[in-house]
Amino acid sequence: MGKRVGVKGAAEITGLSEWEIRTGARTGKYPHMRVGGERGRIIFDIEMLECHIRRMMIENIKNNESEELQEFGKLRKVY
């Protein structure tokens, strides 16, 4: 386990907005812990969060590359 921070700290370190971090945690997009029950404070392990975001970026790049390959040779209307 690495350094642990709240929503504001995670936003500053990752470069994402506080809204994105908070919403992503609520929907399960980003790994987090809750301190103080269901409505308690959201805590992130920075190493884990950065690793997860890095995996998401790599997966996104792979998906975009495969989509580009599927578009190759496809006929389209030109206006």
Image (tube, rainbow, N blue to C red):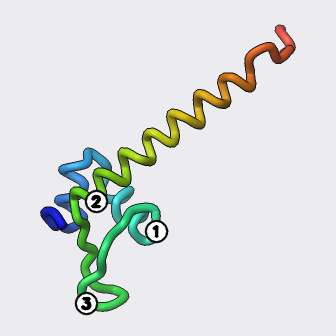
Indicate the position of residue 52 as horizontal and vertical percent values: 37, 54
Indicate the position of residue 38 as horizontal and vertical percent values: 37, 88
Please state if 5 lies on the left or on the right of 19 as rendered.
left
User: On screen, 1 above or below 15?
Assistant: below
User: On screen, 66 above or below 20?
Assistant: above
Q: Residue furthest left?
A: 3
Which residue occupies 20% across, 61% down? 8
Q: Residue type at mark 2: give it.
A: Met
Number of numbered callouts drawn? 3
| Crowd class of label 3 (few under 14; some 14 to 19; many from 20; radius 10 Å) | few
Which residue occupies 34% across, 86% down? 39
Q: Residue type at mark 1: give it.
A: Gly
Find numbered disc 2 in the image and state the secondary structure of the residue it sits on: helix
Q: Earlier in the sequence, mark 2 or mark 1?
A: 1
Q: Which mark is residue 69?
A: none
Figure quadrant of residue 36: bottom left
Residue identified by numbered label 3: 36
Find numbered disc 3 in the image and state the secondary structure of the residue it sits on: loop
Please state if 69 lies on the left or on the right of 1 as rendered.
right
User: On screen, 57 above or below 22?
Assistant: above
Which residue occupies 74% across, 16% down? 72
Residue identified by numbered label 2: 48
Q: Which mark is residue 28?
A: 1
Indicate the position of residue 67 as horizontal and vertical percent values: 67, 30
Q: CA distance from mark 2 to mark 1?
A: 14 Å
